[in-house]
Every structure is written in C-alpha cells, then in structure tokens.
C-alpha cells in the first residue's frame, strides 16, 4: 500500500487508508462509484470473481446509525460478506479542512485524477 495516496472522483476527495493485495484500481473505482456513496465517511471496495463491489460506512461517532454501517464494523463485513482472502481497499472521505490543507479545493468537479500528497 502506498502511504498518502489521494484520489478524486467527481467532486469527492478520498485518502486510501488500506489496500490488501493491490486491490485499488482507479479506473475500476471510477466506473463503479455512484453518488449515493457520497454520504458515507468510508468506502470499502472488495473484489470477488474479478468484480468490484463498493459499500459505505460512517464514522463510529455518528449518531442514529446502524452499528453494522459504522467504521468499526468493516472488519466484520470483510469476514462475513466477502470471499475469504479477497483483495480489498478502504478509502476515507476527506473533510473540507483536509481538502484545503492539501490544496484540493481548486480541482474541477469533473476531474478524475489521482493525486499524490505534497511532500
């Protein structure tokens, strides 16, 4: 996994926080991503039978959220709903403050480029 790997899809900015077995493919992610996922704080992508599946999760401190849709449930999700040993990745949605710090605020909403963190 590359540390400080940032991804932009549409107007959403993410940090790749975990990648198992080189699962993350930007083109495949862009093709599968749907704006319904915008509401989630974390996106988990798992690959089974050569197909990418995306699922969203919220921060643990978010109120009125089912426990199985919180960040702390991701490990259980991977164990129970994904193929054993499958390739997967976890993306964290960046806050507005983080986007500003990283200089991501000026990116056009239609740009779909991978961004490396400043050194």
Image (cartoon, rainbow, N blue to C red):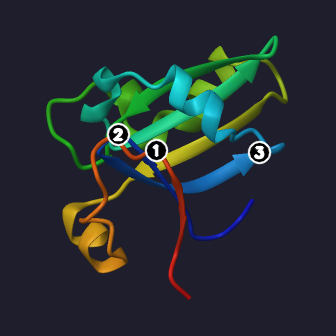
In this image, 33 relative to 75: left or right?
left
In this image, 42 relative to 64: left or right?
right
Q: Which numbered dot is residue 10? A: 2
Rendered position, 15 above or below 64:
below
* Secondary-structure class at tag 1: loop
| Residue 2 placement (x, y as % from top left) | 71, 65
Mark 1 neighbour density, 10 Å: few (under 14) some (14–19) many (20 or more): some
* Secondary-structure class at tag 3: strand
Question: Do the numbered discs 3 and 1 sit on residues whose CB atoms are within 8 Å?
Answer: no
Rendered position, 24 above or below 28:
below
Q: Which residue is mark 1?
A: 112
- Quarter-of-image position of residue 57: top left
Mark 2 neighbour density, 10 Å: few (under 14) some (14–19) many (20 or more): some
Q: Which residue is mark 3?
A: 20
Question: What residue is shown at x 24% (from left), y 33% (from top)?
Answer: 39
| Residue 1 placement (x, y as % from top left) | 75, 59
Q: CA distance from mark 2 to mark 1?
A: 6 Å
Among the two numbered marks 2 and 1 on one chain, the one whose residue lies closer to the N terminus: 2
Question: What residue is shown at x 63% (from left), y 34% (from top)?
Answer: 27
Question: What residue is shown at x 20% (from left), y 63% (from top)?
Answer: 96
In this image, 34 relative to 101: left or right?
right
- Quarter-of-image position of residue 105: bottom left
Rendered position, 6 above or below 77:
below
Among the two numbered marks 3 and 2 on one chain, the one whose residue lies closer to the N terminus: 2
User: Which part of the image, by quadrant, shows the C terminus?
Assistant: bottom right
Question: Do the numbered discs 3 and 2 sit on residues whose CB atoms are within 8 Å?
Answer: no
**For this rendering, which residue is in front, 35 or 27?**
27
| Residue 28 placement (x, y as % from top left) | 64, 28
| Residue 76 placement (x, y as % from top left) | 59, 30
**Does residue 15 appear anywhere in the picture?**
yes
Identify the residue at the far top of this view: 49
Question: Do the numbered discs 2 and 1 sit on residues whose CB atoms are within 8 Å?
Answer: yes
């Amino acid at each position: 996994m590359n540390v400080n790997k940032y991804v932009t899809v549409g107007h959403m900015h993410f940090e790749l926080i975990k990648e198992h077995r080189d699962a993350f493919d930007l083109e495949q992610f862009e093709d599968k991503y749907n704006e319904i996922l915008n509401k989630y704080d974390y996106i988990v992508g798992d690959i089974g039978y050569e197909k990418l599946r995306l699922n969203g999760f919220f921060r643990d401190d978010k109120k009125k959220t089912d426990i199985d849709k919180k960040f702390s449930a991701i490990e259980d999700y991977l164990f129970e709903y994904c193929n054993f040993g499958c390739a997967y990745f976890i993306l964290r949605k960046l806050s507005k403050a983080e986007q500003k710090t990283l200089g991501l605020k000026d990116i056009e909403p239609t740009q779909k480029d991978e961004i490396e963190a400043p050194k």
